[in-house]
Image: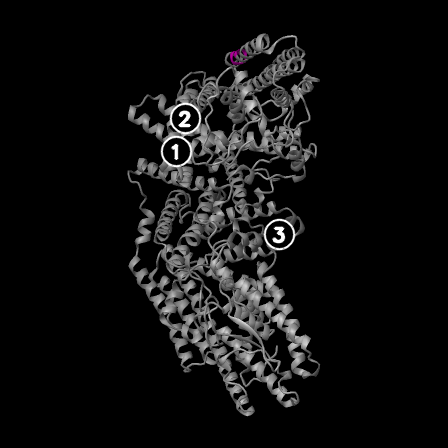
Amino acid sequence: MSRAPTTLARAFSARRNESYRHCLKEDRKAAKPLCPDTVTSSFDAALQQDENDTSTPTESTISRSDTAGSEEVIDAAYNDKEYEKQKERTSNPSPQFSRNETEEKITTLKGHVRRISDKDGENKVDAELKQSDAGRIELKTKDAVSSFSKDDSAARRRRTRTNIPKRKEFHDLVFEPRMTALDRTNPKSAESPFLGFYSLFWLSLALLVVKTLAQNYHITGHFLGSQLHATFTQDIFAVFWVDLLMVASSSFCLVLHKLVQYGLVDWDREGWIVQHVWQTIYLFGAIGVTWARDWPWIQTVFLVLHALVMLMKQYSYSTHNGYLSSVLKHKQAQEAELRVLREGTGARRGSADSGVEINTPAQQNGDGNTSQEEQHEQELELLADIEGCEEELTGPVYGKIKYPANVTLPNFLDYLLVPSLVYEIEYPRTERIRWPYVLEKSAATFGCFFLMVMISEHYVLPVIPPADMPVQDKLANLPWVLLDIIFPFITLYLLTFYLIFECVLNVFAELSCMADRYFYSTWWNSVSWDEFARDWNKPVHNFLLRHVYHSSISNMKLSKKRATLLTFFLSSCIHELVMACITRKIRFYLLGFQMLQLPLITMSRSRWFREWKVAGNVFFWFGLFTGPSFLCLLYVLL
Amino acid sequence: MSSSQLLALPNTEAVRRHRAISTPSRPSQDIVPTLKAIREENHGLESIEKPIPTATRPRRESKHLFHRLDFEYRLTAFDPHNTERSKTSFKGFFILFWLGLSLLVLTTLLRNLKETGRIFGTSVATLFIHNVQEVAMTDAAMILSTFYVIPIQVACSKGWINWNGMGRVLHYSLQWAWFGACMVVASVRDWSWTAIAFFTLHSIVMLMKIHSYGSYNGHLSVIRKQLNALKKAETVENEGLHAAKKEILTLELTSTLGHVTYPANLKNPVWNYVDYLLVPTLCYHIEYPRTPHGIRWGYVAEKALATFGTIFLLAITVEHHIMPILTQASKDLAEEPSALTSGLIFAEALSALLWPYMLVFLLVFYIIFECILNVFAEVTCFADRLFYDDWWNCANWESFARMWNKPVHHWLLRHVYMPCRPRLSRGGATMMTFFISAVLHELVMGMITRKVRGYGFFCQMLQVPFMAIQRSKFMRDKELLGNVLFWLSMITGLSGMTYIKEFTLVDLSLFTH
């Protein structure tokens, strides 16, 4: 890593930055680098990627992009050759730098520019190559470094990366316009030859509702059961106000980062401690409220899950902004240093912000002395460093917002609405809100909810034995009850999934104009449990990947395997916490079952399972069929 | 979704070879007018064919006098060997379906064990086993008796009898007498309704087969005679026309693949006929595309296993999820309640039967079209496995009728619709086809219930106005709505219709063996 002599005497923060940078880097590896044509192209990626996902199930990070590969190749090539050349030039001065080589250089640069403009399609970089009389080659762009127009952001990124080989490599986990696989309006899914069975599934469920209603009317004289309805409405206003308070109080992070921005709080020193203390209070406050008010399980599960979501959001927001504040500081320090350096050399050029220049100083002064050369190299490095920081501080999609400008209330509120648990300065957006779509998905939400209530009320609750039954009877009954509830339970499971990931998240995405709807992958084709864990809940998966997995690797210096284990364990603990809140019992059944997945995952990696994928899928579905219902019974009965 | 997209061509090499063979055998465009003339001459009627607007797909002008099917190298959609299918990203749900079904059967069996002390119920097994030997013997005799068609065709090809005179009369009179005899046997014997259904359906299949065999071979014998007459003709008025006619007639005698010419298929008539009986198609052609890889016995075993497994699932479903409801309903109805109460009993039983019937329908479909037909196809190396199209996506009844049972659809197209075509308009020919199909369905239902009620016939003819609605402007571009409505009518119609039938069954106390 080529680094200018740093004045940052904060070893700790440097390490933290380093680790966070590492996380981002890993995340970015996992995602496609963004160029404008991927922004404009819609929906295509989702299914394609699904296939890629399933084809490489054993990799812990999903390597899914061909373009990433190709681009890296280009960059690598460019880096190796050009950077070496440049270094060569800067280190040994001009004499042997012939005319031929200059021309070669021009052609390569031209090629590079063409490549950029080709890739960008209509967003052409207004660049020109000149060979000045002095033999200096300049690549001038119209836009200065400090101006961030959407058009050239990608090109600029690439250009800067060519100058600075390693440090600027990191790309973030990139959000891009995608659609969910089960969305009716997804053209890729509409192509599936088995679409008709999707209609059959929903129609059967609808008919089931009709039948159940009629039967209920026949028996009780009412269409709807009243048991669950009473549970829902209990204390519902209190839930609403608590929830509102919870959401509102999450703006604590915003305040904290405003303070960081004004320099009143240093994120790396005390800011992050304050944040963690706040989060602990937040989580246990929410749980405490549910226990204190003695809410029924539906209210509890809603509030606890929402609290966890808000917690993850806040954590991501704070960590990301904190990191950016460090970068900003670093950048300011570097700029100061540059100023000092330039004043020392008598200000050969104008301010650093005025433009990018690739200089071949070799021929500038025929008798260039060593100290000047060294100074020049230093300056170049500083410039590169600053530019890298600039890039880091800028929104990754459109490049319109730069770091301190994003710490605003509207941005924060928008982030709360956006269905993502990972904070970014910018997300890809759709052009407008399609209200019919919102309406459709809302209707689907309520319909789904109604279905779930109906199924639980008529097919699950009547079967579960009363709590006052002796334990021995309960145990004797367990297998039969299990047989009774596996079908309603798998239906409930599928409906819950559909409700959250297809309906609710899509409504929020549409309302906040979020274009990236990759909320789940094709988990139904999973052949192993780790694949399922990665695929079925992408927002949480992304969060865990960035903020737990990668940060544990770099912060705690864990091996990949251990980081996976840690992530898994943390996720299991959170699950157990939710179960404990729901059932008011601490039993660790779920934790045990989740830990049981580890040997199963090892098993699924065995040769037999790898070769016979269908068996893996059957095994997976069998687990999904029996696991949740069995767990539920355990918690309820014992 | 076109079938070619859905059903992959597994062996491109074989396909290419097949195409290479089949293409040159197609006649050149310039003989089409002559073809038309001969066709008119043969039918003795003016062709009333109008140019058809080719907005959706260009209709290919048939180059043959007798309608031919284009057999290709294809696989069924649910076949795990189908590479296109395994690319769909929803295949996990297919697994879910089978796993769910297996678990359903498992839980049913366990509950049965808990309640009765036995794992299996017996009523369905009794149905299957009852008189099974007699049924098998009768079935074998039925198949053997169809061999009467061979001597007639051999005689026609040798010129001993004329198809247009003696041959046709002999073939068809024997055919209908044979079919009548089969029906009489099925209805007088003391068989369970499953046996009757099997025997009736098998008889209808054989009827279609021998009809196709007789009419096609007879047609070819006539064509051969015409060709021979042309060749012998000494004075020729129009040289060009004469040559064109000769070309067309020769072409007619040759198979699409181009390896076999008419009388050659009757060189070893018995072997050819046995092969035709085994091949999973109802349309006789003198040559079919065959798989290049021979019989894969692993595949046969897999499909055979699937057949028995699915039949087992089916039997359990019927035993535990259909019969109890029916018995209960008939018990309730036996108390002769008021009209309103009996209506309620009907409605309740109906709503309880919706899912089991749908499931039974899907399973029966799977058994017949995915398992059994594939076994026969593999054993005979038959390469064209388009036994069904993606009917589950269809938005109207018309396409469903076309898609879900390709062999019968092809037969109706070739032996009912096309022969009707010169005499009737398109709509008329469609109606005629529909009518014949409805009559056959009603025949099966009538044989099973031993009563002629006409409910099924009525319901099927009811589809005609439905089709008109589905074709209307409002419905035409609403595919999703159409699909949902299709499934809705499928589920309710199926159970509703069968339900009526089952009540007649209950009257016959066929379930209380």
Identity of the amino acid at label 2?
Met
Q: Chain of mark 2?
A: B
Residue assigned mark 2? B497
Whole-angstrom CA distance, mark 2 to mark 3, is 47 Å
Amino acid type of the residue that numbered disc 1 sits on in the rendered structure: Gln
For label 1, the residue is: B470
Alpha carbon of mark 1 to alpha carbon of mark 3: how far? 49 Å
x and y, in percent, of residue A171 in the image = 54, 68
> In what element is the residue under mark 3?
helix
Nearer to us of marks 2 and 3 is 2
Earlier-in-chain disc, 1 versus 2:
1
Range of residues picked out in magenta? B180-184
For residue A323, which numbered disc appears in the image? none
Label disc, if present, on residue A604 of the rendered structure: 3
* Local crowd size for mark 2, using a 10 Å CA cut-off: few (<14), some (14–19), many (≥20): some
Which is nearer the eye, A406 or B51?
B51
Is A472 magenta? The answer is no
Please state if A312 lies on the left or on the right of A525 as rendered.
left
Residue A23 in sight here: no
Mark 3, Cα crowd under 10 Å, few <14 / some 14-19 / many 20+, is: many
